[in-house]
Image: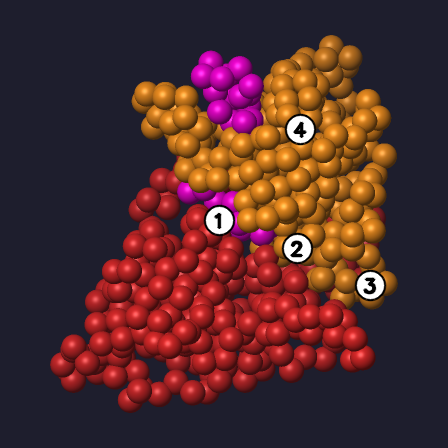
């Protein structure tokens, strides 16, 4: 990326033009903290579906604050590599949330919320790398963006492994994570990503010192999940259980 | 990823490309991710030209930022539901198979996987009058047998329907990769497809060499399948085997576990996985994994699949 010189005033203005308040986004999981500038990882094995939780984060970010104060009405960039979350699921989930709040004129809210979501479909490793390289420009184009979500940071691990036989999923994930964090530095974004780790020994291992929350997700039975949430900021560990039913997450 | 070539950008000269190749910069990705000053020194293009080429390459090769609302509008115009024509199955699947998705029908040997796939194919070609590509890895598609599924139609209609099936034999995983790559690049200008059936994945992936190579090929296959189904609004339907895994070692077997063939990586790839169990002429279909459907089951008498 090009080097840019900016004054302190310009820096202050740029940082403050981004969505300022991402506190109380998911009280049950991440408490009341403002999630701006936070990096959150959700780790699970292949068999545990992270997508319902990732989808829940997406819709909480894009839905309007005037309907529910926990919703943030902010722009989200979603890097889609596994194609398990699509527009139709987003719509069904939003609709379910609005129905539960007896909201009338749902279609207008769905339309405005969808306008907050920008999807980057990546079909191979090279495309992902170029997309990460161009991320800074893509974020700059949309002043409303407050959150970056990546469905699976390990998606193209096996393709990369061809070039380096000894590469582990952990090392590969760390490399991708560092590239992304470098690209989004200075935008005050909340960065959430999924990570597949099949070896249980490494489930609780923090990917980087820059990760603020580490969620280890496991499936208890069909539609019932347990998330072990480690906060490195407050040095606490909480266990949260939730169920997923008909496009909505219910925290216990 | 495309190799660097003069046609990629007007500023590229033959000598510049040759110099870049000598410095191990072969592809658009290598060029974009290399230091601009270094590129300028190597290619003898000036710094501003390098930045201009980079800007153009990023525009071409980076993922396009799609607004979800525009994507939804596009989906409304181009997507379709492909029913099986069997009421019980269609109701269970919320109308049928949604274009843009990968479906997997899995089950033990002789559980009716190919039969169910052919039932969907029959409805696509006979009722919807759409084209279907069959990637046949078992080399056992028989048009005569297939016509038994279509007894309610006249011979002329059946012949017309059969002409809508394009069959490609894939004998190895590399054949499959090449076929998918071809489909991804051709954009089907001459042969518009609504469904691609792969029967079956396990028959070409089970006789594998190494774990790493297998996962590498599966990753490429999955990426191409997602690309084709999403970009061209096609249903990708494949059959896969459920295998029995014996836990423990030879001396102390601790139990058995039924699992999908092709390993754990493949477990996450399909958008919807339907598991079949065939119990005395009743076909039990269970949604094992789905991003749209609840994880429930339905039982369908086999005769409904064959005579209706």
In the picture, the quarter occupied by the C terminus of chain B is: bottom left
Q: Which of marks 3 and 4 is in front?
A: 4
Q: Which chain comes out orange in the rendered image?
A: A
- Which segment is the magenta one? A60-89
Q: Mark 1 — residue?
A: B291
Find out whether residue B293 is within the magenta segment: no
Q: Could you give the CA–CA distance between mark 2 and mark 3, rounded to whole angstroms?
A: 22 Å
Q: Could you give the CA–CA distance between mark 1 and mark 3, rounded to whole angstroms?
A: 33 Å
Q: Which chain comes out red in the rendered image?
A: B
Q: Could you give the CA–CA distance between mark 1 and mark 2, rounded to whole angstroms?
A: 15 Å
Q: Residue A164 carries which label?
A: 3
Judged left or right of residue A175, residue B213 is: left
Read off the chain for label 2.
A
Give x and y (percent) for residue B223: 57, 60
Quadrant position of residue B167: bottom left
Give x and y (percent) for residue B124: 29, 67
Name of the residue lying farthest toward the top: A9
- In the rendered view, tell whether residue B194 sits above or below residue B178: above
- Looking at the rendered structure, whether the residues under marks 1 and 2 are on a common chain is answered as no
Q: Mark 4 — residue?
A: A29
Q: Do the residues labelled 3 and 4 touch (CB within 8 Å)?
A: no
Between A84 and B184, the one lying in front of the other is: A84
- Looking at the rendered structure, whether the residues under marks 3 and 4 are on a common chain is answered as yes
Q: Mark 2 — residue?
A: A46
Q: Which SS class for mark 2? A: loop
Q: Which SS class for mark 1? A: loop
Q: Which SS class for mark 4? A: helix
């Amino acid at each position: 990326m090009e080097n840019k010189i900016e004054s302190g005033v310009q820096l202050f203005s740029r940082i403050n033009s981004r969505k300022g308040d991402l506190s109380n986004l998911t009280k049950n999981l991440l408490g009341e903290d403002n999630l701006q500038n936070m990096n959150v990882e959700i780790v699970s094995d292949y068999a545990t579906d992270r997508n319902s939780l990732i989808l829940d984060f997406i819709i909480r970010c894009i839905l309007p604050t005037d309907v529910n104060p926990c919703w943030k009405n902010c722009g989200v960039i979603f890097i889609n590599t596994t194609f398990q979350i699509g527009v139709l699921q987003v719509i069904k989930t939003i609709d379910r949330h609005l129905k539960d709040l007896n909201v009338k004129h749902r279609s207008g809210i769905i339309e405005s919320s969808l306008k907050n979501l920008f999807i980057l479909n990546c079909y191979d490793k090279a495309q992902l790398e170029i997309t990460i390289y161009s991320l800074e420009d893509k974020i700059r184009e949309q002043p409303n963006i407050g959150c970056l979500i990546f469905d699976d940071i390990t998606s193209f691990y096996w393709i990369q492994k061809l070039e380096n036989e000894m590469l582990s999923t952990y090392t590969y994930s760390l490399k991708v994570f560092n590239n992304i964090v470098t690209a989004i530095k200075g935008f005050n974004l909340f960065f959430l990503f999924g990570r597949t780790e099949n070896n249980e020994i490494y489930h609780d291992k923090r990917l980087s010192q820059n990760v603020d929350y580490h969620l280890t997700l496991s499936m208890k039975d069909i539609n019932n999940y347990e998330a072990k949430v480690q906060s490195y900021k407050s040095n606490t560990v909480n266990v949260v259980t939730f169920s997923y039913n008909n496009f909505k997450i219910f925290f216990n | 990823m495309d190799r660097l070539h003069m046609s990629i950008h007007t500023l590229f000269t033959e000598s510049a490309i040759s110099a870049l190749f000598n410095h191990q910069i072969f592809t658009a990705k290598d060029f974009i991710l290399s230091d601009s000053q270094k590129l300028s020194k190597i290619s003898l293009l000036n710094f501003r030209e390098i930045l201009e080429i980079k800007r153009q390459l990023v525009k071409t090769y980076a993922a396009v930022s799609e607004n979800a609302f525009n994507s939804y509008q596009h989906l409304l115009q181009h997507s379709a539901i492909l029913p099986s024509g069997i009421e019980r199955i269609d109701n269970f699947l919320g109308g049928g198979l949604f274009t843009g998705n990968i479906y997997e029908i899995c089950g033990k040997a002789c559980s009716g996987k190919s039969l169910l796939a052919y039932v969907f194919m029959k409805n696509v070609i006979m009722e919807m009058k759409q084209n279907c590509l069959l990637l046949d890895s078992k080399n056992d598609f028989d048009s005569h047998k297939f016509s038994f599924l279509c007894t309610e139609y006249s011979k002329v209609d059946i012949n017309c329907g059969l002409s809508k099936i394009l069959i490609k034999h894939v004998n190895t995983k590399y054949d499959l990769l090449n076929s998918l790559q071809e489909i991804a690049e051709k954009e089907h200008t001459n042969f518009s497809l609504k469904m691609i059936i792969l029967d079956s994945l396990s028959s070409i992936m089970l006789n594998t060499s190494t774990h790493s190579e297998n996962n590498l090929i599966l990753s490429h296959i999955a990426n191409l399948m997602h690309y084709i189904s999403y970009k061209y609004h096609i249903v990708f339907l494949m059959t896969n085997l459920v295998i029995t895994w014996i836990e423990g070692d030879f001396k102390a077997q601790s139990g058995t576990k039924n699992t999908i063939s092709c390993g754990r990586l493949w477990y996450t790839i399909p958008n919807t996985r339907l598991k079949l169990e065939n119990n005395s002429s009743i076909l039990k279909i269970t949604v094992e994994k789905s991003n749209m459907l609840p994880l429930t089951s339905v039982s369908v008498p086999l005769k409904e699949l064959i005579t209706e």
